[in-house]
Amino acid sequence: MKRAPRSHTRVFEVFRMDDDRYERQKRLWDQRKISSLRVLVGGAGALGNEVVKNLVQIGVKRVYVVDFDKVVPSNLNRCLFFRRSDASKRARKVDAVAKRAPDLNPDVEVIPVFGDIKELSEEVLRDVDISLGAFDNVFARLVLNLSCYTHNIPLVDGGMEGTYGMVQVVLPPDSPCVECGMTDRDLENMWERVSCSGDVVVEEGPKLPYIPMTGALIGAVQVMEAVKIALGLESYRSSGRWNDSVGAPMVGKSLLIDLKTNLCYTYELHKRADCNVCGI
Ligand SMILES: [Zn+2]
C-alpha cells in the first residue's frame, strides 16, 4: 500500500494535537499522574475559587471543596465561579463552585462538602492525596493543618490580604507545619476569635481588602506546588530526587509576595519544639 507523503502525515499529527485538551501540558508532565490525583480544597472563597479553577483546568481526578459559607454580593469581585444569582439567593459557596466547574472541564469530579472543616469526615481525609488550604482565618488553617499532619497528607497552605499573599508547603512527617510558621500574635488573635464551644466568632468590624489579582497569583503558586508534589513525591521518597520537569516544591518554606512592590521572599521555617502538631 502506498504511504502518504510525509508532509500529509505531519498535517494529520498537527490536527490531532489540537484534539487533546491536555496536549500542551503533557509536554511538561505525565498526565496520567495528574488525572488520578484526588485533592482536598479547604475554603471556597477567593483563593478557593482560583485553586479549584486551576485543578479543574489541569484535569485532576477529584476535588473535594469544603466551606460553610454562603455567597454574598461582595464576593463577586474575586470569585470566578460565583454569579449575581448565587448572591441573591445566598447559595452555598461549595455548591456554586461544583455547579460551574464542569463548564471548564467535565472530566473532573468536584464534590461540594458544606460544613465546618473541623467536622470533615475520615472518609474524605482517607481519599485524598494532597490538600490545599484557602482559608481567610487562622483557626480554619490550623484545623486543616492538624488533620493533614495526622493523616500524613501533604498540605499547600495559602493566604492573602490586599496586595500581599503567602504560600507554605507542609510535608508530614518531617517538615514544619502551619502552626510552626505562626507568630504568637497570630495565635493570640485566633484565640480571641474562638468561643469556648470551639466555634469561630464572626465579629462585625472592618473587613480586610481583597483584590482578584492577588488570589490569581497565590492560587497559581499553590496548585503548581501541589503538581510538584504529585509528580515527584514517589521519587523523592525512594531516591531523594524530585521531578526535574516541574522542579522541587518548597517543602518547609514559606513564600511571601507583595504585588504593591513586586517583592518576593522565600524563607526557611523550623519545627517548634512546643508545636502542638509536629513538635518533637
Ligand atoms: Zn508544627
Image: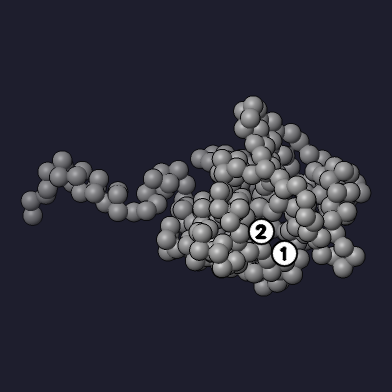
The quarter in which the N terminus is drawn is: bottom left
Residue drawn at x 85%, y 42% is 183
Q: How far from the left and from the top, in percent, is residue 166?
A: 68, 41
**CB atoms at circles 2 and 1 under 8 Å apart?**
yes
Circle 1 residue: 117
Does residue 155 appear left or right of residue 269 in this picture? left
Q: Name the element at disc 1.
A: helix
For the residues labelled 2 and 1, the Cα–Cα distance comes to 7 Å
Does residue 143 appear left or right of residue 238 in this picture? right
Q: How far from the left and from the top, in percent, is residue 247?
A: 57, 39
Residue drawn at x 60%, y 61% is 71
Q: How far from the left and from the top, in percent, is residue 69?
A: 66, 63
Circle 2 residue: 42
- Which amino acid lies under the numbered mark 1 shown in the image of this protein? Ile
Between 22 and 209, the one nearer to me in the picture: 209
Q: How far from the left and from the top, in percent, is residue 246?
A: 53, 41
